[in-house]
Amino acid sequence: MADKAHHYLANLVWSGAALSAARDYKSYSRAFTVMIPGKPLFQGSADPAFLGDPTAHNPEDLLLIALTSCHLLSYVALCANSGIVIRSYADAAVGTLSQQPDRNFAFTQVHLHPQVIIEPGGDLTKAVRLHERAHEICFIARSVNFPVEVSPQVTFPTA
């Protein structure tokens, strides 16, 4: 059987090192740059709660982006293959990062809230049900060790 694996490459450099060495927890820069072949550079930092730059994306943001965008792409593909025409899709994902008994932090839940408008005459029941299937096939959600809840709302356009 042929290899069905997909491989991804990301080169990360701690760009904060150019400002100063990490001598103590409070004073070093959390800035980093990620280079992915053929794509724009990505600048990131830690969350402000961990002394990062509040204007830069952080790993917590990236996890939410990965989960909500994987669900979106899975859902849109399923709808397209099922004859359901989507006019708009928006999500307001909420993630919970909690301190654990060992004093380390971990995500304990992510909740997706997709708001979908489908073409009039489409099958609303099926459009809602396809969110369940999208969640089942979303490989990012399948890869995390915490619950990812999905509470979709699918409607027709209002006049």
Image (cartoon, rainbow, N blue to C red):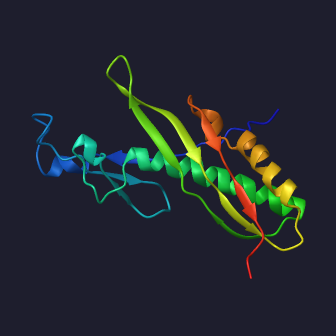
Viewer-proximal residue among 48 and 9 = 48
What is the quadrant of the N terminus in the image? top right
Q: Is residue 116 above or below residue 133?
A: below
- Please give the name of the residue rendered at 53% of the width and 35% of the height, measured from the top-left corner: 109
Side (left or right) of 139 relative to 38: right
Residue 40 x, y percent position in the rendering:
43, 64
Tally of numbered discs: 0
- Please give the name of the residue rendered at 35% of the width and 17% of the height, measured from the top-left corner: 102
Residue 126 x, y percent position in the rendering:
86, 54
Side (left or right) of 24 relative to 109: left
What is the quadrant of the C terminus in the image? bottom right
Residue 146 x, y percent position in the rendering:
56, 30
- Please give the name of the residue rendered at 60% of the width and 42% of the height, measured from the top-left corner: 7
Viewer-proximal residue among 19 and 109 = 109
Q: Is residue 3 above or below residue 151?
A: above
- The residue lying furthest to the front in this view is 159
Q: In which quarter of the image is residue 23?
A: top left
Residue 66 x, y percent position in the rendering:
55, 49
Viewer-proximal residue among 124 and 31 = 124
Side (left or right) of 20 relative to 149: left
- The residue lying furthest to the bottom in this view is 159
Viewer-proximal residue among 121 and 10 = 121
